[in-house]
Image: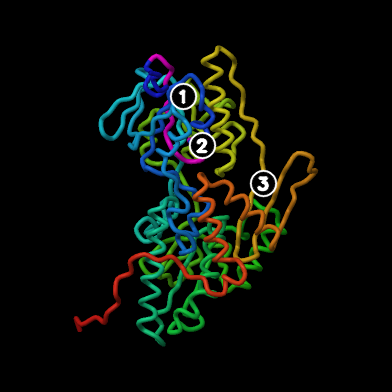
Amino acid sequence: MTVPHDQRPDLPHVVVVGGGFGGLAVVKALAGAPVRVTLVERRVYNTFQPLLYQVATGGLSPGDVTYWLRGLRLAQKNVRVLHEHLVGVDHDARTILLANDEKIAFDFLVLANGVTVNYFGTPGAKEHAFGMYSRSQALKIRDQLFVRLERSAFTPGSDDGLRVVVVGGGATGVEVAGALAELRTAGLEPAYPEIHGEAFEITIVQRGPDLLKSFHPGLRSYAARELERRGVRLRLGAGVAEVLPDAVVLTDGTRLRSDLTVWSAGVGPHPEVDDWDLPRRKGGRIAVGPDLQVEGRPGVFAIGDIAETPDWLPQLAQPAIQGGQRAAHNVLALLEGRPTEPLRYHDKGTMAVIGRRAAVAEITAPGLASPLRLTRGAAWLVWLFVHVMSLVGPRNRVTTLAGLVTRYGFPFHRRPIPIVGDVPTVRPDKSG
């Protein structure tokens, strides 16, 4: 009887921490290699984060953007999936410590545990704003959105409308605001006749003068025009000084009423990384060399959002995927006595969707003298194809495509039915 690779102690042990884009790329690149792979992930599923805003606004089910990690075993027998939380690393003993007090020895360690919401020390932000970097956070936003809509509908004609403030004008902020505007215009106006006109406001707050600052100026202008055409208010040039339960105070003193504040202004390392005895660079990212090995820690790699290479890479999916593939190849090179190779990142471009038939995309490819810049329906179709094909698993691709088509496609967009959760009944206050 053949013993599975993941149960053979004589094989080198590669421990991968994190089941996101980078971690899965490492695991898949080691399929068939003469190693044991242990994937440590605090959740039992992989989350496709670029579409979390669709979950938060009722466009997709959370199951559409998550993949059961143990499903990896169906096609790859040298991997073991461990549902636990990493709390410490002993570099001398080459072991990791998990939250259940289990110690796991490793020959190679790949840290791909990603990052979390960064509130930058803004007073009240952690307590009163909703981050959107995990499935549970997206569901909280969705549920709070419909709780507040029900409350607004319960008091028609009053000033108790719904004001949503989105903090951050990057791709996530633009996509959240655009999806909310689409939901309001196509779905909520007929469903909530009690909520009139300006009673449902959406505002983006961006510290800098432009949205999507990493994009070409022409694409930035197009995105701003499209959002304003869809009724999204832009507050540019002032940051957030404080978040209150019912308002957002800007650095210029302006006070914006906010019933729901969505924080998409930045990310940072998880606090536990401070205890892992690793060199750090600006922003707290782990310092790695060109071959993605942690500086001063041979055999330990860091990839994706948590890592910072000497030439700096953006915190996007492609750097994580390509970094995971390079880290896996370098592990095999070390095992075979070959020199490691640096990550040569190929920028494939970036994109953001605003709403139905509206998106921006910058695509780079060999042979193009300059990036191909797209807007409107062409960019939207490219965005749709890339995101659907990037999902893990055929079921997720099919259900997500169906969900997005029924939300944006003709003629379904005229009557989109959002996906909702449990919303408590709104009743009058009898205390008075």
Amino acid type, mark 2: Gly
Q: Earlier in the sequence, mark 1 or mark 2?
A: 2
Above or below, 67 against 75 in this view is: below
Residue ranking furthest to the top: 337
Is residue 207 in view from this perspective?
no
- Label 2 Cα neighbours within 10 Å, binned few <14 / some 14-19 / many ≥20: many
Q: Which residue is mark 2?
A: 22
Give x and y (percent) for residue 287.
51, 31
Residue at the image position 43 percent from the left and 70 percent from the top: 258
Separation of disc 1 and disc 2 at Cα?
A: 15 Å
Percent of width and height locating residue 419: 43, 65
- Circle 3: residue type: Gly
Q: Position of residue 180 (x, y in %)?
A: 51, 67
Q: Quadrant of the C terminus?
A: bottom left
Q: Secondary structure at mark 2?
A: helix
Q: Which residue is mark 1?
A: 300
Is residue 2 depicted above or below 425 in this figure? above
Confirm or deny contact between disc 3 and disc 1 (CB under 8 A).
no
- Residue 108 or residue 315, whichever sits in front: 108
- Residue at image position (41%, 32%) is 39
Residue range highlighted in magenta: 10-23
Q: Which residue is disc 3 drawn over?
A: 349
Q: Are marks 3 and 2 in contact (CB under 8 Å)?
A: no
